[in-house]
Amino acid sequence: MSTSDFRDLEVWKKARQMTIALYELTDKGPLARDYGLRDQMRRAAVSVCSNIAEGNERNSDKDTVRFLYMAKGSVAELIAQTDIASGVGYLTAEEASKLTQAGEEVARMLGGLIKYRENSA
């Protein structure tokens, strides 16, 4: 159940920062020209923010948790795509590491929020 505006959630703020960083990263270099991978990465990152927001607005903890799990799945998708982008030389090791670390941090935060909400139900 929503306890606050989704924009007040620390996990949403971190996911937003990660998404903005990803947009900046995919706006240059060879990844900017690989429209398929670039767009898929962007969709995954936006999905994280969107599912956190939508879940927070649901009327039950069960619904909220479902959307938080979807957000967590989108983080995993983004991390996998980051590994692929790095493997084909679209991202430097440092760029990929920063993006992966941001994703892992968001995933940990989502995991904590999921546990909290599951125990509230």
Image: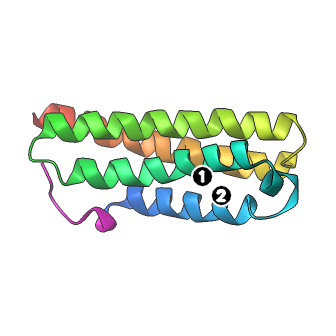
Numbered range of the magenta stretch: 1-8
Three-letter amino acid code at the position of disc 1? Arg
Tell me if residue 7 comes above or below residue 78 in the rendering: below
Given the current orientation, which residue lies at the most extreme right position? 89
The kind of secondary structure element at disc 1 is helix
Dominant SS in magenta: loop
Measured as percent of width and height from the top left, residue 42 is found at 60, 52
Identified at 71% across, 52% down, the residue is 98
Three-letter amino acid code at the position of disc 2? Leu
**Depth check, front residue: 117 or 65:** 65
Are there few (<14), some (14-19), or many (20+) residues within 10 Å of tag 2? Answer: many
Q: Is residue 11 left or right of residue 3?
A: right
Measured as percent of width and height from the top left, residue 48 is found at 45, 48
Residue 69 location, quadrant: top left
The kind of secondary structure element at disc 2 is helix
**Depth check, front residue: 28 or 113:** 28
Q: Can residue 105 be seen here?
A: yes
Q: Is residue 25 magenta?
A: no
Q: Which mark is residue 42?
A: 1
Q: Which residue is mark 2?
A: 22
Evaluate if marks 2 and 1 touch, with contact meaning CB atoms under 8 Å apart: yes
Identified at 32% across, 61% down, the residue is 9
